[in-house]
Amino acid sequence: MILDWVLYIHILAATVWIGGSIFLFTLGIFLRDKEAQEQVYYHIGPLYGYMESVWLTVLIATGLWMFYHLGIDNVVRHWTPPHFAYVMVVKLVLVALITIFTAIHMYIAFKTHGRERTKMEKLLSRSSSMAIFLLNLIIIWFAMQVRGAL
Ligand code: HEM
């Protein structure tokens, strides 16, 4: 019963986290008016940043809870069965990468809030947001494989 609720919160967190990241990514591409884009990011940027970090924390916390509660740690340590251990480890590596890119992206966002960015800051901010976007799409695939193999 408690597992159902933890999984429910995990999936809810995944929808908010991924939905938010896809929405902001789309905004960055389709909102071409530079002035409007600056205004939007200026006003919703910090709120979005705090909200997304809370949901990423919830995702990792509920994920870790299931990981230990279901005994997946033992399965992964002994690579049994190999396919399941493999998909779980790949998912964990992707989550670690997404956490690093999120930290980079947030660091630049808060550091440059309300001022013009240097070329390097623009490059780091755009490439980390692209990486987060793509990694999310891949993580959903591996999350499905984990669930299917349980
Ligand atoms: C960005 C981070 C993450 C995302 C987007 C994510 C996404 C998801 C999604 C969508 C599911 C449901 C899959 C389905 O029903 O087919 C799921 C299940 C699962 N996730 Fe995650 N997850 C994340 C992080 C983690 C972490 C860090 C762990 C473990 C340390 C983890 C462990 C699990 C487990 C064990 C399940 C299957 C639970 C079950 O079926 O009972 N997740 N994840």
Image (tube, rainbow, N blue to C red):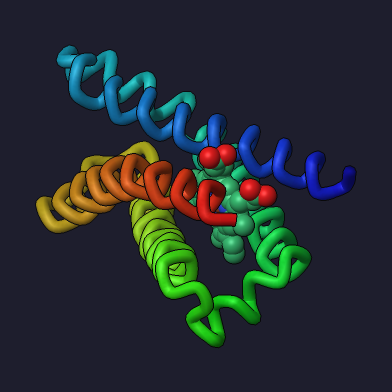
Q: Quadrant of the N terminus?
A: top right
Residue drawn 46% across the image and 28% down it: 19
Q: Residue furthest left?
A: 119
Q: Work out whether residue 45 or residue 85 is closer to the camera in this orientation and state it.
A: 85
Question: In the shown orientation, is residue 7 left or right of residue 51?
Answer: right
Q: Residue furthest right?
A: 1
Q: Percent position (x, y) of residue 92?
A: 47, 66
Q: Quadrant of the C terminus?
A: bottom right
- From the top left corner, tell me how far across and down residue 70 is, in percent: 73, 64
| Location of residue 72 with respect to 133 vertically, above or below | below
Residue at (18, 13) in percent of width and height: 33
In this rendering, position of residue 122 left or right of residue 93: left
| Front position in the image: 125 or 136 | 136
> Residue 10 is drawn in which quadrant?
top right
Residue in the image at 27% along x and 44% along y: 134
Number of labels in the image equals 0
Give whichever of 7, 16 is nearer the camera. Answer: 7
Image quadrant assignment for residue 65: bottom right
Percent across and percent down for residue 126 are 21, 45
* Residue 8, x across and y down, in percent: 72, 36
